[in-house]
Image (cartoon, rainbow, N blue to C red):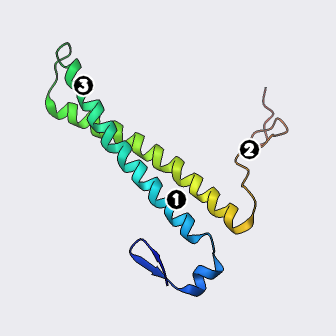
Amino acid sequence: MVNLGLSRVDDAVAAKHPGLQSYAACQSHAFMKGTGSFVLGAVSLFAIQKALQRRLPYPLQWNLLISIVASSVGSYAVTRWETQKCSDLWLLLETGKVPDRSPPQGSGKTKYGDIME
């Protein structure tokens, strides 16, 4: 049996997917990075707003709300970016090829068939 966090994976599945342990470690790292960016973002934004509150006074609940919402958006972006890298790692380990994430070079047409000017 192979452990992935709190779950156990059967040996047959682990043998079929040799990169499973690396992928799980990458995902765990991505989630921890997202959590860390949320905490650091919330604390730093709260501190910045507290310093600015001398010039622009507004209630504490708005200070907290802005800090939490902004750090949530930033944390989501960090987690999404890191998770995308883990998906690329998984595809590399399974297929041996890196996925092409570059935008397609088109013929000058949009997806609706119009010619771009």
Say which residue label 3 marks.
49
Q: Residue at x 67, y 65 (%)?
A: 93
Q: Residue 4 or 110: which is nearer the viewer?
A: 4
Pointer 1 residue: 26
Left or right for 117, reference 47: right
Q: In the image, is 97 to the left or to the right of 64?
A: right
Amino acid type at circle 2 is Lys
- Residue ID at (52%, 85%): 10
- Looking at the image, is mark 3 or mark 1 earlier in the sequence? 1
**Mark 3 and mark 1: Cα distance apart in space:** 34 Å
| Nearer mark to the viewer, of 1 and 2 | 1
With 37 as the anchor, is 103 left or right in this view?
right
N-terminal-most mark, 1 or 2: 1
Query: Mark 2 Cα within 10 Å, few/some/many (few <14, many 20+)?
Result: few
Residue type beneath disc 3: Gln
Point out residue 84 in the picture as x, y percentages from the top left corner: 57, 53
Q: Which residue is drawn at 79% across and 25% down?
A: 117
Classify mark 3: residues with Cα within 10 Å, few (<14), some (14-19) or many (20+). many
Q: Which mark is residue 111?
A: 2
Instruction: Point out residue 114 in the picture as x, y percentages from the top left corner.
Output: 78, 37
| Quarter of image, res 56 | top left
Q: In which quarter of the image is residue 73?
A: top left
- SS for callout 3: helix
